[in-house]
């Protein structure tokens, strides 16, 4: 218990430092904790900006803040693993094994459902994509990034200009693996509920049902992790990139919708932490 308390305090301290470093306040905040019905691609709407990395920041300041964020992110991920290990049932349910934290990108009405179809549209990151990401501002500084054979990022993943992902700190991420494999996953949002998620094999139409043993999708969503998928609008394919995002829109407040990107449609996803899987 004492170890868990220490981890919690250190994690809170890291979050506090991150908030200080990145000037979190928004001039306007979304009223929804999660996109209210994230079941189809929606057109992006204008969004008020944050105070993060405004035009008065020097390049050195921005680089330093990015390095601080990456360091905190790595530390936070390690602490998350330690904290959730302490929250896992002991012993684990039969047939389950502990894993370093993985991340499911889920769609569905978060507030009212604990089971539904549609898991074939869910993806999973088996490693944390945040530290492997590339900042929106890097695309703005280097217009050739992601174009003309320059699509491989430093971490080794391929950028797709017609289907890209951005997270709450303004980092462009690799795509998750689609779909989530059938099986059982122990999931949590890092709050009160840690429970089993079951994903069924595809039916005759390719649809995959899912169900939670306890709680709703909202209960197992990690609110600080924001994630959205961006598609250029018809006729804009190949003409849009993360460089069209507003750098001042980041970071995104916990639970708020992700910002728009000029010329793109947007799909917000809930992020579930996976802490154990089937053997």
Image: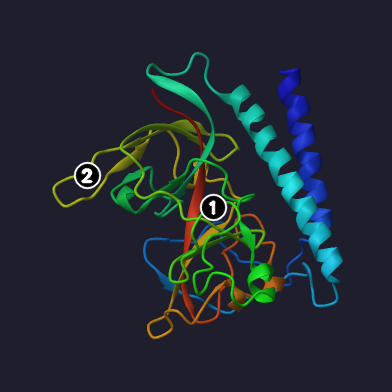
Outermost residue toward the left?
204
Which residue shows up at 60% across the image and 37% down it?
Answer: 191
Tell me the SS state at disc 2: loop
Whether 203 is drawn above or below 99: the answer is below
Outermost residue toward the front?
149
Q: Which of 90 and 101 is in front in this view?
A: 101
Question: Is residue 28 in view from this perspective?
Answer: no
Q: Residues within 10 Å of mark 2 (few under 14, many from 20)?
A: some
The residue singled out by tag 2 in the image is 202
Whether 19 is drawn above or below 104: the answer is below
The residue singled out by tag 1 in the image is 156
Which residue shows up at 80% across the image and 61% down it?
Answer: 63
Measure the C-alpha gap from mark 2 to mark 1.
Answer: 31 Å
Question: Is residue 243 in view from this perspective?
Answer: yes
Q: Residues within 10 Å of mark 1 (few under 14, many from 20)?
A: few
Q: Where is residue 245 in the image (x, y as percent from the top left)?
A: 61, 75
Q: Nearer the viewer, residue 57 or 220?
A: 57
Quarter location, residue 171: bottom right
Which of the two labelled residues, at mark 2 and mark 1, occupies the earlier sequence position?
1
Tell me the SS state at disc 1: loop
Q: Which of 146 and 38 is in front in this view?
A: 146
State the colouring used for the structure image: rainbow
Q: Position of residue 68 (x, y in %)?
A: 80, 51
Q: In this view, does 37 lie to the left or right of 245?
A: left
């Amino acid at each position: 218990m004492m170890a868990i308390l220490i981890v919690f305090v250190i994690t809170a301290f890291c979050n506090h430092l991150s908030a200080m470093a990145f000037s979190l306040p928004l001039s306007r905040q979304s009223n929804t904790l999660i996109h209210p019905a994230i079941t189809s691609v929606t057109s992006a709407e204008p969004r008020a900006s944050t105070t993060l990395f405004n035009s008065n920041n020097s390049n050195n300041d921005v680089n330093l803040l990015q390095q601080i964020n990456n360091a905190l992110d790595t530390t936070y991920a390690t602490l998350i693993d330690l904290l959730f290990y302490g929250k896992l049932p002991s012993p684990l349910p039969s047939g389950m094994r502990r894993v370093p934290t993985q991340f499911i990108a889920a769609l569905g009405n978060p507030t009212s459902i604990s089971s539904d179809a549609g898991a074939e549209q869910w993806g999973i990151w088996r490693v944390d994509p945040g530290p492997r990401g590339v900042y929106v501002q890097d695309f703005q500084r280097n217009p050739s990034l992601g174009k003309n054979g320059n699509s491989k990022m430093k971490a080794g993943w391929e950028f797709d200009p017609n289907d890209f992902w951005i997270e709450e700190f303004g980092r462009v991420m690799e795509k998750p693996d689609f779909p989530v494999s059938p099986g059982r996953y122990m999931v949590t949002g890092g709050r009160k509920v840690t429970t089993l998620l079951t994903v069924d094999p595809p039916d005759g139409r390719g649809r995959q049902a899912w169900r939670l043993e306890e709680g709703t999708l909202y209960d197992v969503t990690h609110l600080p992790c924001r994630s959205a998928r961006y598609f250029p609008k018809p006729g804009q394919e190949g003409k849009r990139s993360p460089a069209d995002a507003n750098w001042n829109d980041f970071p995104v407040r916990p639970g708020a919708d992700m910002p728009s990107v000029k010329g793109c449609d947007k799909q917000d996803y809930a992020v579930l932490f996976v802490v154990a899987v089937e053997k």
